[in-house]
Amino acid sequence: MTDREAYVAFNLTDQVGSATVGRLVAEAGSAAAAWERYPKKVSRAGGEIDVAREFELAESFGVKILVCTDDGYPDELKSAPGHPLVLYVKGDPKALSKPSIALVGTRRATEYGLSMAYSFARDLAGDGWGIVSGLAVGIDAEAHRGALDAKGVTVGVLGSALDRFYPAENRSLARTIVASGGAVVSEFPFGRTADQHTFPQRNHVVAALARGVLAVEAPVKSGTLITASIAADLGRLVMAVPGRVDSRSSQGCLALIRDGATLVRNALDVEQEMGQLFPRTRAPAEKGVKAPPPEMPGAYTVEEAMVMRHATVDGTSIDEIARKTGLPAAKTSSLCMVLRVKGRLRFLPGNRVALPRER
């Protein structure tokens, strides 16, 4: 068995993640050796692991299999803890590595939300950003359509296996994404249907593939807020589109803004915010693509800057930051939460915070 086959085998067990497999590989010396030592060689359904069949199915469906050690595996995703061992890609794998922004939101969108999703995605894709979303009905679908209408690149991340496509009504949209140079991707082996466990995993991939996450419209109890929380933990910038204060569909985005997410009104706002974090990554690749706006000053308030001055990549306790800054503990904790939602800090166990990992 090759190392690539071993990673696919581990993924078929559905029992271990990338962190555990990484440790096993380090101990054994290779993925193939780690698999030979692994005692639980049983598929999620309880049967034998059949790696050869997985590759045969991929060939028959025109799907490319990327394992986490392949050169084509996207760096943004690989740098994220808990990244998938395997990606099943229909379309161009290079689309996964394009500097991207994730647009997410409710399936039960209003006309306002659908319009905002479409226009943000169209304008951002027209300026050269990739658009990542979850290929769900509602906000996700409109984001993909906006990117397509701008002749841009968009990536749809499924909460099911590629051969168990969900939701069925977006199959045609998925085919258009692939035909237009984008990609549809899943971390799930062939045969896996969507369920309550697969969508949080999908949300993690959506957040990790992007450099920033934009919540367009969502109620308070929504997978959108889960995706935003994951993005903040990964050090991604979290942004939100404001809506009516009396609209149930806007309460999630309003809560994110209240808690520190960046309020954006249009694609220019998004690009200005992204320019603060990635001032040199947005060189237009094609003739006719507009240059990014200049980097904007004033990324932090005075108190936020005081907190950031004492944050490290390895982690610093919030109590220690309060002591060094002279700010009240409650105020320091609140500032850390705001910076977390903005994607400037990560929260660690033990009431500690840390700077985002290098990407």
Image (spheres, rainbow, N blue to C red):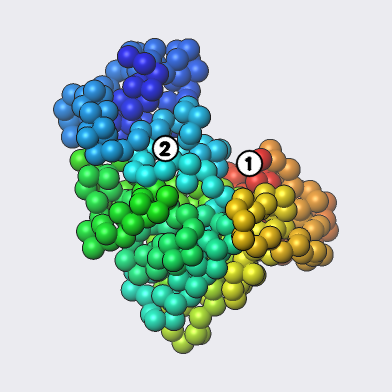
Which of the 4 image quarters holds residue 46?
top left
Which of the 4 image quarters holds residue 343?
bottom right
Mark 1 or mark 2: whose residue is earlier in sequence: 2
Is 329 rendered above or below residue 47? below
Tell me residue 42's x, y (percent).
Answer: 23, 25
Q: Amino acid at mark 2?
A: Pro
Q: Nearer the viewer, residue 294 or 286?
A: 286
Q: Is residue 312 visible?
A: yes
Is 185 rendered above or below residue 336? above
Tell me residue 341's x, y (percent).
Answer: 60, 60
Q: Residue at x 47, y 54 (%)?
A: 153
Tell me residue 332's x, y (percent).
Answer: 72, 60
Q: Which residue is label 2 attached to?
A: 84
Tell me residue 142's x, y (percent).
Answer: 40, 68
Question: For mark 1, does the 10 Å Cα neighbourhood hold few (<14), some (14 to 19), or many (20 or more) residues?
Answer: few
Q: Is residue 157 visible?
A: no
**Left or right of 159 in this view: 48:** left
Contact, mark 1 vs mark 2 (Cβ under 8 Å) = no
- Label 1 sits on a secondary structure element that is loop
Q: Nearer the viewer, residue 117 or 345?
A: 117
Q: Residue at x 27, y 34 (%)?
A: 58
- Label 1 and label 2: CA atoms lie apart by 17 Å
Q: Which residue is label 1 attached to?
A: 359
Q: Nearer the viewer, residue 319 or 184?
A: 184
Q: Amino acid at mark 1?
A: Arg
- Label 2 sits on a secondary structure element that is loop
Numbered mark located on residue 184 in the image: none
Which of the 4 image quarters holds residue 56?
top left
Q: Quadrant of the C terminus?
A: top right
Question: For mark 2, does the 10 Å Cα neighbourhood hold few (<14), some (14 to 19), or many (20 or more) residues?
Answer: many
